[in-house]
Each structure stands twice: as C-alpha cells, then as structure tokens.
Image: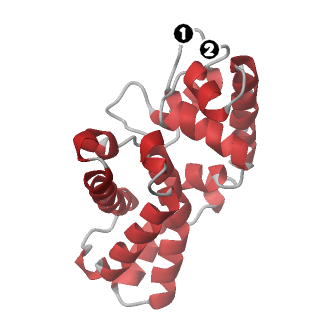
Amino acid sequence: MAASRFPNVSPLIAQARRGDAASRDRLFGLCRSYLDIVARSQVETWLRAKVDASDLVQETMLEAFRDFERFDRTSEQEWLAWLKRILAHNAADFVRRYRGTAKRQARREVPIRSPQDSTHAFGAAEPAAPCPTPSQEFAQIENELWVTAALAELPPDYQEVIVLRNLQRLSFNEVAERMERSRPAVQMLWMRAIRKLQEAMGAEDRLE
C-alpha cells in the first residue's frame, strides 16, 4: 500500500461538506480502521471486561455522522483530531460509568504520531529490547490513515503486538504477559509484525 495509492482525504471532506453523500460515506469508511486502532490503544485491560473497543468505534462513528455538519475544518489532521476528541469523550464516559476513580486512564490519548513528542507511538523504545530500529523508522511516518490502513491488513496477532508495544507502550515483559507468551517469542513476533507492516505500506528501505 504505497503512500501515493492512499486517497487524499481533504477533497473528500470538502465534497462531503457540500452534501455529497457518497464522499461522506467513503470518508467515514476510510476512518474506521484508524478509529479502531486508536480505540484499541486506549482501552485499558480492566475496561476491556466491560466494553469492547469496537463499541467505542461504533458510538464514535454514529456521533460523528450525526454531528458532521458541525465540523467546519478542511484538513485531514483537523478531521482526525475531531474524531479522536469524540472517541476520547466516549471513552471517558465509559470510565465514569464503570470505574470513576480511574478517569485518567481512558482520557490518556496515545497519538499514532506526535511531532511534539520525542517518543512517538511508533517509536517507543526499551533499552533491553533487541533491534529497536524498525519501530524507530515508523516514528517518521506522518500519514496516520496510511499507517492504520496497513496495520488493519495484518494478522490479528501482529496487530495486537504492535498495538500493545508501540501504541500502549508496554514493555516486552508486559506484552508477553498480556499475550501469554514468552518474552523472546513476543520480541520475535513484534519484529516480524513490524517487517510485515513495512511491506504492507510498500516500504523500500532495508532494515538495519
């Protein structure tokens, strides 16, 4: 999935705001994978027993669709930020409903890439982790929809290890415990997953 093959979202936003239903439907369809990854990165272990990340995505999509006329911006970044704010609000509601004393956990937003943060979501590092170079390379990726669309193409275990390691920023020991695997097995799985993600995105650079 090369970057040039991923559609430019800004024209879709403009067309949808002019009342083009087909553009609006395509716009929302392109963003579902993105919201799914963001939701999975925010739903803590204790909250998963109460709500599936897909529930947050569905509620967010419905609210965004209902309130689309209120969105008055034009860029992809502004559109994604608007969607993330709705999702974060819904996540906070779930927290208040099920465990009010832990509000800060669901409100913690982990961006796919934050230019102001030296430790990006795709650049989480752990000194003891072997070969951190693959995830550091992904710290340079700017198109969030492109990343999440490629991630959605991977097998479930590849998706999970990247979400846990790079988005939730868990240590390899924590990821191993969550996935019920050994640390070496998780490290190998993570390295294979990153390589597959690069392939899905059409990465041309060789890993160091």
Which residue was labeled with disc 1? Answer: 127
Q: Position of residue 123 (x, y in %)?
A: 51, 28
Left or right, 60 with reference to 204: left
Q: Position of residue 113 (x, y in %)?
A: 43, 40
Q: Quadrant of the image for the C terminus?
A: top right
Image point 51% across, 62% down: which residue?
Answer: 54
Which residue was labeled with disc 2? Answer: 129
Give SS at disc 1.
Answer: loop
Image point 42% across, 62% down: which residue?
Answer: 56
Tag 1 near tag 2, CB within 8 Å: yes
Image point 45% across, 57% down: which residue?
Answer: 51
Image point 29% across, 47% down: which residue?
Answer: 99
How packed mark 1 is, by other alpha carbons closer than 10 Å (few <14, some 14-19, many 20 or more), is: few
As drawn, 172 above or below 13: above
How packed mark 2 is, by other alpha carbons closer than 10 Å (few <14, some 14-19, many 20 or more), is: few
Asked which quadrant contains residue 206, the reply is top right
Give SS at disc 2.
Answer: loop
